Image (spheres, rainbow, N blue to C red):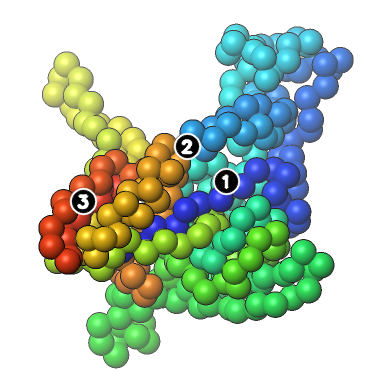
Amino acid sequence: MNIIEAMVVSEASITYSNLPALDHPAYAAGVSYAKGDRICAAKPYKVGVVDLVGQHVFESLQDNNQGNDPSADDGSNWLVIGPTNRLRAFDGTIGSGTSHAGSVEFKVQTDRTCDALAFFGLRGGTVRVRVYTSQDALIWDKTFSLFDPIEVSNQFDFWFAEREFARVYLVTGLPRGGNRFVHVTVDAGTGTAEIGAMVLGTQANLGITRPGTTVDFRDFSELNEDQYGNIAPVARQKIRLVNYRFSYETENTERILRRVMRNSGRLVVAYQALGTERYGTLVYGLINDLELPGEAVFSDGQLEMRGVVE
């Protein structure tokens, strides 16, 4: 039973990317915009409880839209579409991902020790992770295949079934130390690469995962029924809920409690153990509840995670 205390990645943390900083022209006060025109402007937003400012996409709701600052608009003149493509991998959700033809690349400067990296909503064939010192010296370089044989159960499937690739992936063992540069490349070949969420952070072990750990799926979609009895599905967001059962040394109760409490309201990654992605317990979200009953030498605790929108 482990958590990754996530580093919040801001625009300033991204020192390089193969994606443009802006998806549309920057807002200019002297330009008259037509209805439907899209621009980019800086806007405050939150990742968990952390306040950030970053480029967002806005769409004009009016013709002759001039002199109305989108970042200060009340919704009368501009519709907020969301963060730019470059920021979506770090906006605290999985459903709104960063995508690019061929590959997606980010080089992020860390502000703390980051020894783990988790990906959600992946689309690609490989992930390459490089770590550089503050003097830009390469000290770690590994490439991981995302091919996932989860649907291969026989020889026929191996040769003829459609290839499946992992949508979530966990990388650990990054060299410890602050002020590093982590360069990530998700390569999709001739396809479109995508990262729903990319989470850099510091690992913390809470204990040993026990039987009774459960994974739940909650879909907020609904069926609409009209006066004639016709029904139509309405797609909504979906989340993952994980209830971890774990054993821990009772003398570590205060240490575990401190680690969880300092991440109150902050997005973290929780996982059962390295290589257990197939169990469905790798989740990115908020810690909902923690129970640490004090028993003898070892105790059995419980931690509930509510995943972000997928």
* Labels 1, 3: front one: 3
Residue 233 position within the rendered picture, expressed as x and y whole percent measured from the top left: 26, 35
In the displayed structure, would residue 223 be above or below residue 162?
A: above
Q: Secondary structure at mark 2?
A: loop
Asked if marks 1 and 2 touch (Cβ < 8 Å), the reply is: yes
The local crowd at label 1, few if under 14, some if 14 to 19, many if 20 or more residues have their Cα within 10 Å, is many
* Labels 3, 2: front one: 3
Q: Please indicate whether residue 27 sits to the left or right of residue 165 in the image.
A: right
Amino acid carrying label 2: it is Gly
Rounded to the nearest whole Å, what is the CA distance between mark 1 and mark 3?
28 Å
Q: Please indicate whether residue 177 sits to the left or right of residue 48 in the image.
A: right
**Residue, x 79% and y 10% (percent of image)?**
67
Mark number displayed over residue 8 = 1
Q: Which of 193/111 is in front?
A: 111
Amino acid carrying label 1: it is Val
Examine the image and state in which quarter residue 213 appears: bottom left
Q: Secondary structure at mark 1?
A: loop
Mark number displayed over residue 292 = 3
